[in-house]
Amino acid sequence: MSVSTLTTEASFGGATHLVCRACGAHAKLGADYSCWECFGPLEVAYDFGTVTRESIQAGPFSLWRYAALLPVPSNIAEQRNLAPGMTRLHRADNLAKALGITGTLWVKDDSGNPTHSFKDRVVAVAQSAGIQLGFGTLACASTGNLAHAVAAAAARAGQKSVVLVPSNLEQHKIQATAAYNGHVIGIEGNYDDVNRLCGELIGEEVSADWGFVNVNLRPYYAEGSKTVGYEIAEQLGWRLPDQVVIPVASGALLTKVDKGWREFVELGLVEDRPWRVFGAQATGCNPVAEAWREGHDVVRPVKPDTIAKSLAIGNPADGPYALDAVRRTNGAIGDVSDAEVVEGIRLLAECEGIFGETSGGVTVATTRKLLALGLLDPTAETVIVNTGEGLKTLDAVSTGNGFSATISPSVDAVANVIEGSK
Ligand SMILES: *Cc1c(COP(=O)(O)O)cnc(C)c1O
Ligand SMILES: [Zn+2]
C-alpha cells in the first residue's frame, strides 16, 4: 500500500476517489468539481467495507453516526464542528387529514438543525473536506441558508468565512449570518450571477485559500444530503417509505436522498422495495418541474422571481440528475404559485405546529397539487421534507402587526375577543 493511499484513508474515510457522473472518468480526491475529460460533475466514490445497523446506532446522535458512509475521517465527531442532523421525524396525522392522505404521513423537520436549515449537513461534510485539503477559509455562493450555515460552521471551527449572496436577500437572513462576524458580501445580481462569480474566483490570488463549499468542494458538500435519506430510513425503523416529496433548488438534496436509499439497500441495512421520489418547486423558479412536464432531459435555465428565495436557482447544477431520479422511480415534479406557498406554510403550522420557511410551504403546497393531479398516491406512506425554519422568512406570512386584537388588561375585554371570534 502506498503512502498516498494511507493518507487518503486517514482523511476521507471510506471515500476512494472522485468519479465523473457523465463519462465515468476517475479523479483523485481533491478540490475538483468538474471532469477534466468532459466537464461533467464529479461525485465521491467509496469502498464502504462493513457497515451494520448496530455500528450506526453505536455512533453519536448526529449525522456523524453515518461517518463511515461519508467522505470524512473516522474521528470527525471528536473535531470542532456543529454536528448537525438527527432532526425529528414527526407523524403528521392532522396534515394528512387536511390533504386527504389516508396513508401515514411524516414530516422530516430539518429546521431543527443548528442554523435552522438542512444546509448544516452539507456544510459539515464540505468543511471537513476543506480542512483535509488545506483551505483556511470557508466560502460559498448562497441564496441565504447556506451563507448562514457556512458562517456558523467556520466560527465553530475557528476558521475565517466569506459568503457571497444576492444583495436583495431577506434582511433577517443577512443579519443572522452577520452575527458570526465573517465576511458577508452582497452581490448586485441574482444567485446565478453570484455562482458564476464564485466559479471565476477559483484559482484567483485573493481567494486562493478559500474552499467554496458548493463550488470546488461540491462533490463532498452534496454527499451531506444523503444523511436526510439515511435518517428517514433509520427513524422509520430501518425501512423505506412508499414516496417522498423534496424541495428542489440545485436538485442535490433530491438526488442524494435517492442515492442514500440505494446505498442502504446495497449495504443490506433496509429491505429493497420500490420507492417514488417527488420534487417541489415554486412556479417563479421551476426549471426542473418544467423539464419534467415537457419530457426534456435538458433543464432550460430561468430567471427566478419568487418569494421562495432559498429555492431560487435558475440554472440548477443537479437538475438533470434530479430528473433522472424522479423518472427512474416513477415520481413527478410539481410547482406552485407564491400565494400557494403561503397557504402551504400556514397549513403546516396550523396542522402540525411546525413553522416552515418558504421552502416548506413549497413542499406542502406541491404535495397538495400532486395529489390533486393524481400523481401522488393518497393511500401510500409518504414523507415530506421541511428544510428550513419559518422565522427566516417571516415577511412571507406577515399580516398587519400579527395580533388578533390589542385590548385593555381586563377579563371582559378578553371575553369580548374570544366570544367575538366564535
Ligand atoms: C438549499 C435549500 C434547498 C434545496 O437544496 P438543493 O440541494 O440545492 O436542491 C431546500 N430547502 C432549503 C431551505 C434550502 O436552503
Ligand atoms: Zn467526464
Image: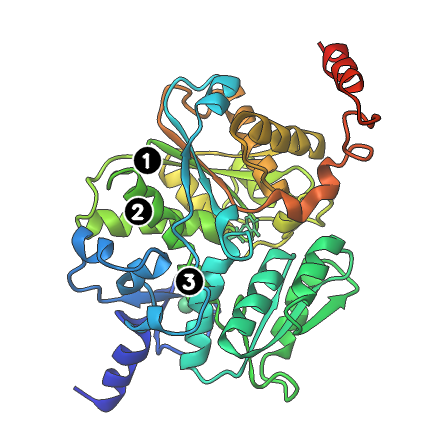
| Residue sitting nearer the eye, 98 or 157 | 157
The image quarter containing residue 101 is top left
Eyeballing the image, is 375 above or below 279? above
In screen coordinates, is 302 left or right of 262?
right
The image quarter containing residue 234 is top left
The residue that disc 3 covers is 83
Q: Judge depth for marks 3 and 1 and give the one in front.
A: 3
Q: Residue at x 52, y 47 (%)?
A: 111
Question: Does residue 303 show up?
Answer: yes
The residue that disc 1 covers is 275
Amino acid type, label 1? Trp
Q: Residue at x 81, y 35 (%)?
A: 401
Which of the marked residues, 3 or 2, is nearer the chain's N terminus?
A: 3
| Residue sitting nearer the eye, 272 or 270 | 270
Question: Does residue 31 show up?
Answer: no
How far apart are the two marked residues, 3 and 1, measured between alpha carbons?
29 Å
In screen coordinates, is 346 left or right of 132?
right
The crowding category of the residue bearing disc 3, from other C-alpha atoms within 10 Å (few below 14, some 14 to 19, many at least 20), is many
Query: Would you say the residues marked 3 and 1 are in contact, meaning their CB atoms lie under 8 Å apart?
Result: no
